[in-house]
Amino acid sequence: MDNQALTQLLSLDGEERYDHFLSLVAEEREIWILVNSENRFLKIASDEDGMQYLPVWPAEVFALNYAQGSDDLTPLCITLPDFFRKWVPGLSRDGLEVGVFPGLDSTLWITEAEELKRDLQDAMSDF
């Protein structure tokens, strides 16, 4: 993906990026997160309400772009079956939300893991 296409996708608003995320993940069957050198996943806390969320991306290139400037973060692929079977229950148990496809602006679609799972299952039925 060239820089112009990357910037164009990252410039979409949160809802448009969410829709794009659903279609890409439904097609590729993988989700990308960032982990540090200790293999701990990136978790972001909102300053406003203290809510914590796991940022996720539909492709490695987007996670890499987000991690630019950080020496300690690398992308990690999670297959969709693993995400459904292991991550969704774990995130729900720990009270973590999911921040879907962070972009260039301050808008971000934040959802519960179970809701994201349902939306992904609906999107996969289109393929």
Image (cartoon, rainbow, N blue to C red):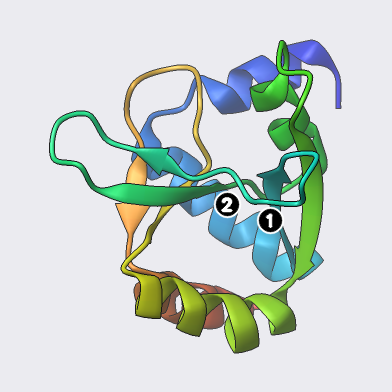
Which residue does the numbered mark 2 point to in the structure image? 21
State the quadrant of the C terminus: bottom right
The answer to whether residue 125 is seen in the rendering is: no
* Residues at marks 2 and 1 touching, judged by CB atoms closer than 8 Å: yes
Position in image of residue 45 (x %, y %): 34, 39
- 109 vs 93, nearest the viewer: 93
**Number of the label disc, if any, that sits on residue 41:** none
The answer to whether residue 114 is seen in the rendering is: yes
Please tell me whether residue 44 is drawn above or below residue 111 in the rendered image.
Answer: above
**Image point (53%, 42%), residue name:** 101
Report how far apart the C-alphas of labels 2 and 1 lie in the structure.
5 Å
Secondary-structure class at tag 2:
helix
Left or right: residue 96 compared with residue 2: left
**Image point (27%, 35%), residue name:** 46
State the quadrant of the N terminus: top right
- Type of residue at label 1? Leu
Which residue does the numbered mark 1 point to in the structure image? 24
